[in-house]
């Protein structure tokens, strides 16, 4: 059965609880979604780390503008499907 939770915490392997804006899960499979407007490099790296720590393999990050310096980091997240969506400035 599919379950949708908002502002949800998932405990990572480290024991740290990480918060995602939306979690959709079906049994043990998760899709995480976060929205970060005007993100800094630190925001993007924190998103990457919480996906890695929680073992969320499918994630969508919606941003107003993804810093070029972080695009390669997100692309390198092995064995996962991490997508970024940049909003138009119009």
Image (cartoon, grey):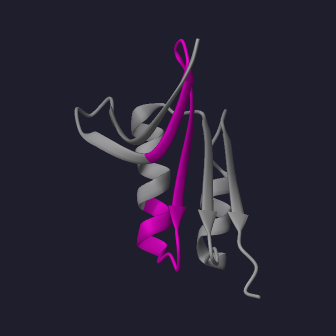
Residue range in magenta is 21-45
Classify residue 32 by image quadrant.
Answer: top right
78 above or below 42? above
Q: Residue at x 56, y 47 (%)?
A: 33
Q: Residue 84 in magenta?
A: no
| Quarter of the image with the C terminus in it | bottom right
Q: Residue at x 71, y 70 (%)?
A: 86
Q: Give the x, y percent position of residue 76.
A: 66, 50
Q: Give the x, y percent position of residue 57.
A: 59, 33
Closer to us: 87 or 48: 87
Q: Give the x, y percent position of residue 28.
A: 52, 15
70 above or below 40? above
Q: Which residue lies furthest to the left in this view?
A: 15
Q: Give the x, y percent position of residue 84.
A: 68, 58
| Quarter of the image with the N terminus in it | top right
Give left or right: position of 28 versus 65. Answer: left
Give left or right: position of 89 versus 23. Answer: right
Q: Residue at x 43, y 68 (%)?
A: 43
Q: Which residue is drawn at 50% across and 43% down?
A: 22
């Amino acid at each position: 059965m599919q379950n949708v939770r908002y502002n949800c915490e998932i405990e990572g392997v480290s024991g740290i609880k990480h918060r995602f804006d939306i979690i959709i899960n079906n049994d043990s499979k998760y899709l995480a979604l976060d929205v970060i407007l005007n993100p800094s490099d630190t925001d993007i790296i924190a998103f990457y780390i919480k996906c890695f720590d929680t073992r969320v393999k499918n994630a969508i990050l919606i941003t107003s503008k993804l810093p070029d310096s972080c695009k390669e980091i997100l692309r390198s997240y092995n064995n996962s499907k991490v997508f970024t969506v940049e909003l138009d400035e119009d």
